[in-house]
Image (tube, rainbow, N blue to C red):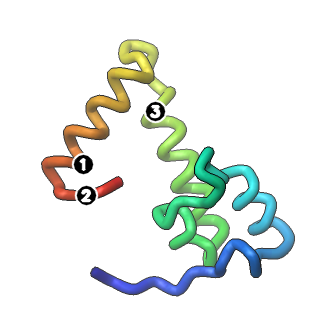
Amino acid sequence: MAWIPMIPEDEAEGELKEWYDRLRDPWGGVDDIMRIHSISLPTMKGHYELYKSAMTGNPDLSRKEREMIAIVVSSINQCHY
């Protein structure tokens, strides 16, 4: 697995800190899949917008159906996300 430098949540400042606060999960932290973008805030914003669009964009699928598809795809790809 590739290693990507990330700015730790406790070292984030300014707009990055605001985004970390926005992306904080119920478990209290920010997922690595989002933190890998910490050195490039535009890519974090783009990733977030892509995810939001994929999970809410088309009204033909419910949120539950989208989550089920994501689980199946992640399983097939052997990805823990």
Q: Quadrant of residue 60?
A: top left
Q: Earlier in the sequence, mark 1 or mark 2?
A: 1
Relative image position of residue 17 (x, y in whole percent): 78, 66
Specify the amino acid type for callout 1: Ser
For mark 1, give the secondary structure: helix
Q: Residue at x 62, y 73 (%)?
A: 38
Disc number lying in front (2 or 3): 2
Residue hosting label 2: 79
Q: Tell me if label 1 and label 2 are in contact, CB under 8 Å.
A: yes
Could you tell me the amino acid type at mark 3?
Met
**Lateral position of residue 59 relative to residue 24, left or right:** left
Rendering coords of residue 20 (x, y %): 70, 61
Crowding at dot 2, Cα within 10 Å, few <14 / some 14-19 / many 20+, comes out as: few
Q: Which mark is residue 32?
A: none
Q: Which residue is mark 3?
A: 55
User: How many other residues sit within 10 Å of disc 1, few (<14), some (14-19) or many (≥20)?
Assistant: few
Disc 2 marks which amino acid? Cys
Reading the image, the residue beneath label 1 is 74
Closer to the chain start, of discs 2 and 3, is 3
Instruction: Identify the residue at horizontal 18%, vertical 57% (top origin).
Output: 78
- Left/right of residue 28 with respect to residue 78 in the rendered view: right
